[in-house]
């Protein structure tokens, strides 16, 4: 029988990186920037956190002196700084220098993956591990600490309380992003910049400032998704190229949710479930059928892209200036 009690928590954990990525990209696209560098930013966010955690654990001469709070703080700051620098680089190229956003995003994805693999491989060699991975189990345990009552409340605790704090932070950030976009003046200005930057500029709204701010905040949020995958889902194990294509699925999720962060919560968990569906459906020894189940998230992505291209409702369309550089001289 299908084991829902173990499937749902795994689907949630699988979907959290997608939720971080889609929330960050939604904020970015609302400003009119199409950041296809999200996969690379998530990769850089992950390796930056790993570097911080590795530096802290390596600096301890006495293992008993390990502090979970300090390990989490150092790792988070490292991830935030690495992701922020990637966001600033993207904005400098596309907003200040007005480079093509599609080319810049793809270049940053290639750069981010190469950056992560280079430093990841270097850390593996420095650790002296003969296996092609780096284990940061103590820092990971600090991130994976479950909520109180997770072990004593039965199925309720397993379904709702058994996750690390980064999982709940992802949901909170999504709700906050939705509130800011819909209910605040800042969100109104941001949406105006994404729809018609010339009109927003004429109304006294700083187009470049909003683009920089939204893209950098979105990059930091996406970077946290990479950190969650390593420290929580992968139990602190870093291995090169292990992150897979989750960054691209996060970008597709933005279209699936019609640029609404709250919808991203349930959509991310849905995609997370599709991602691991092949592990829970019995296929016996027929490996070909198992491979077909592995295609589920990508088939759904293609279907979503097809239906999104034929939408006629204006509210379900992307921001009008998405992917276009703003030239103030043409206003």
Image: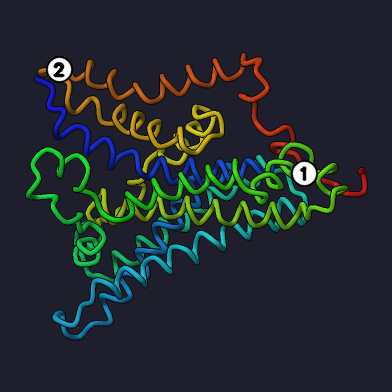
Mark in the foreground, 1 or 2:
1
Closer to the camera in the image, 286 or 209:
209
Name the residue that disc number 2 marks: 283
Q: Tell me the quadrant of the picture where the C terminus can be found.
A: top right
Q: Tell me the quadrant of the picture where the N terminus can be found.
A: top left
Q: CA distance from mark 1 to mark 2?
A: 50 Å
Is residue 123 shown above or below 192?
Answer: below
Residues at discs 1 and 2 in contact (Cβ within 8 Å): no
Q: Which mark is residue 19?
A: none
Q: Secondary structure at mark 2?
A: loop
Residue 299 location in percent, x, y? 41, 19
Residue 127 location in percent, x, y? 25, 70
Q: Earlier in the sequence, mark 1 or mark 2?
A: 2
Name the residue that disc number 1 marks: 325
Q: Residues within 10 Å of mark 1 (few under 14, many from 20)?
A: some
The number of discs equals 2
Q: Determine the residue located farthest toward the front in the rendered image.
A: 183
Q: Residues within 10 Å of mark 2 (few under 14, many from 20)?
A: few
Is residue 86 shown above or below 249?
Answer: below
Q: Is residue 301 left or right of residue 15?
A: right
Q: What's the residue at 16%, 56% (across, down)?
A: 148
Is residue 112 shown above or below 326?
Answer: below
Closer to the camera in the image, 24 or 152:
152
Q: What's the residue at 50%, 66% (across, down)?
A: 81
Q: What's the residue at 40%, 30% (across, down)?
A: 267
Q: Is residue 95 left or right of residue 71?
A: right
Q: Is residue 284 left or right of residue 143?
A: left
Q: Secondary structure at mark 1?
A: loop
Q: Is residue 225 left or right of residue 30?
A: left
Residue 13 location in percent, x, y? 28, 42
């Amino acid at each position: 029988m299908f084991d829902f009690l173990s499937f749902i928590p795994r689907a949630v954990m699988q979907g959290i990186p997608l939720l971080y990525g889609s929330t960050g990209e939604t904020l970015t696209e609302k400003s009119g920037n199409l950041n296809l560098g999200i996969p690379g930013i998530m990769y850089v966010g992950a390796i930056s956190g790993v570097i911080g955690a590795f530096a802290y654990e390596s600096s301890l001469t006495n293992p008993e002196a390990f502090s979970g709070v300090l390990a989490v703080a150092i790792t988070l700051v490292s991830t935030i700084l690495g992701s922020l620098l990637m966001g600033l680089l993207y904005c400098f190229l596309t907003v200040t220098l007005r480079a093509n956003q599609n080319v810049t995003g793809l270049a940053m994805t290639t750069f981010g993956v190469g950056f992560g693999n280079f430093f990841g491989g270097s850390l593996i060699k420095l650790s002296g591990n003969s296996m092609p991975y780096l284990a940061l189990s103590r820092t990971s345990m600090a991130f994976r600490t479950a909520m109180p009552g997770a072990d004593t409340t039965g199925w309720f605790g397993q379904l709702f309380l058994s996750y690390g704090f980064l999982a709940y932070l992802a949901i909170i950030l999504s709700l906050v992003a939705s509130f800011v976009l819909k209910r605040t003046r800042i969100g109104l200005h941001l949406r105006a910049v994404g729809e018609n930057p010339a009109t927003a500029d004429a109304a006294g709204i700083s187009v470049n400032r909003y683009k920089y701010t939204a893209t950098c905040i979105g990059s930091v949020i996406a970077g946290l998704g990479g950190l969650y995958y390593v420290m929580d889902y992968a139990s602190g194990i870093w291995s090169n190229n292990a992150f897979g294509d989750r960054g691209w699925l996060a970008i597709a999720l933005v279209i699936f949710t019609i640029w609404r962060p709250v919808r991203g919560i349930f959509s991310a968990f849905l995609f997370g479930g599709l991602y691991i569906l092949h592990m829970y459906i019995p296929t016996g020894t027929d490996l070909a059928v198992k491979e077909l189940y592995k295609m589920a998230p990508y088939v759904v992505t293609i279907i979503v892209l097809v239906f999104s291209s034929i939408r006629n409702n204006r509210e379900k369309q992307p921001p009008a200036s998405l992917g276009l550089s703003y030239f103030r001289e043409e206003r």
